[in-house]
Every structure is written in C-alpha cells, then in structure tokens.
Image (tube, rainbow, N blue to C red):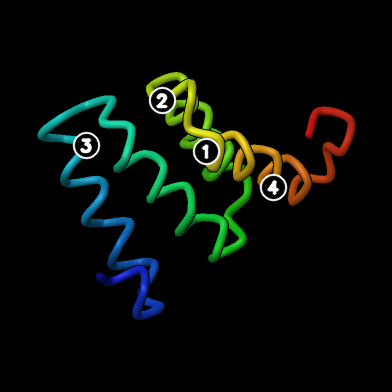
C-alpha cells in the first residue's frame, strides 16, 4: 500500500482515481483523508473526511480523524 510505505501523495492520487470510478466511496474518502492528515493538508482533509463521515456514519475512526483535522485548523471547539 502506498500510504503504508509513506508515499501519501501517490496514495491520494490512487484514491482520487477510485473516487472517479465510484463517487462517494467511503473507504477511499477515509483513506484519502488519512493521507491528507499525514501531509498536514488540514483543509483538504476536513473536506474529504466530512464526505467520509457522510458516507460511513458509523465509522468511528473517520469521526476521530475529522476531529483531528479540525484541531489542525485550530478549530478546537468544533473538534
């Protein structure tokens, strides 16, 4: 897996390709958000994780990462 090897930029490109084939695919959104967090791309991570949470409302880790993105944006009260 590209993300596990630390190549988050390449992983994001793969997730984007998957999302073009299957828009709203929750796992691809979640994994893309995780890679964006690893790159400290907080705004993009939050937008992506908002979509992941909408697609996978019971996915606790997606909610957790959404909070982490909010903290990265210094929006503590929303996290």
Reading the chain from its start, which is encountered first: label 4 or label 2? 2
Query: Residue at 54% across / 45% down in the picture?
Result: 45
Query: Residue at 48% across / 32% down in the picture?
Result: 59
**Viewed as shown, does residue 48 lie left or right of 18?**
right
Q: Which mark is residue 62?
A: 1
In what element is the residue under mark 3? helix
The Cα–Cα distance between marks 2 and 3, rounded to whole angstroms, is 15 Å
Reading the chain from its start, which is encountered first: label 2 or label 3? 3
Reading the chain from its start, which is encountered first: label 3 or label 1? 3
In what element is the residue under mark 1? helix
Q: Which mark is residue 30?
A: none
The Cα–Cα distance between marks 2 and 1, rounded to whole angstroms, is 8 Å
Tag 3 near tag 4, CB within 8 Å: no
Query: Residue at 64% across / 41% down in the picture?
Result: 64
Q: State the residue position of label 2.
A: 56
Q: State the residue position of label 4.
A: 68
Q: Which of the two discs, 3 and 4, sits closer to the camera?
A: 4
The quadrant the N terminus occupies is bottom left
User: Residue 57: image x %, image y %?
Assistant: 48, 21
Tag 2 near tag 1, CB within 8 Å: yes
The Cα–Cα distance between marks 3 and 4, rounded to whole angstroms, is 23 Å
Foreground of the two, 60 or 73: 60
The Cα–Cα distance between marks 3 and 1, rounded to whole angstroms, is 17 Å
Q: Taking 68 as reference, is 26 above or below it?
A: above
In what element is the residue under mark 2? loop
**Viewed as shown, does residue 45 lie left or right of 56?**
right
Reading the chain from its start, which is encountered first: label 1 or label 4? 1
Foreground of the two, 42 or 35: 35
């Amino acid at each position: 897996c590209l993300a596990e090897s630390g190549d988050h930029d390449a992983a994001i490109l793969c997730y984007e390709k998957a999302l073009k084939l299957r828009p709203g695919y929750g796992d691809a959104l979640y994994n893309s958000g995780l890679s964006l967090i690893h790159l400290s791309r907080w705004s993009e991570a939050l937008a992506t994780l908002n979509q992941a949470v909408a697609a996978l409302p019971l996915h606790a880790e997606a909610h957790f990462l959404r909070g982490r993105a909010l903290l990265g944006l210094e929006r503590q009260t929303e996290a």
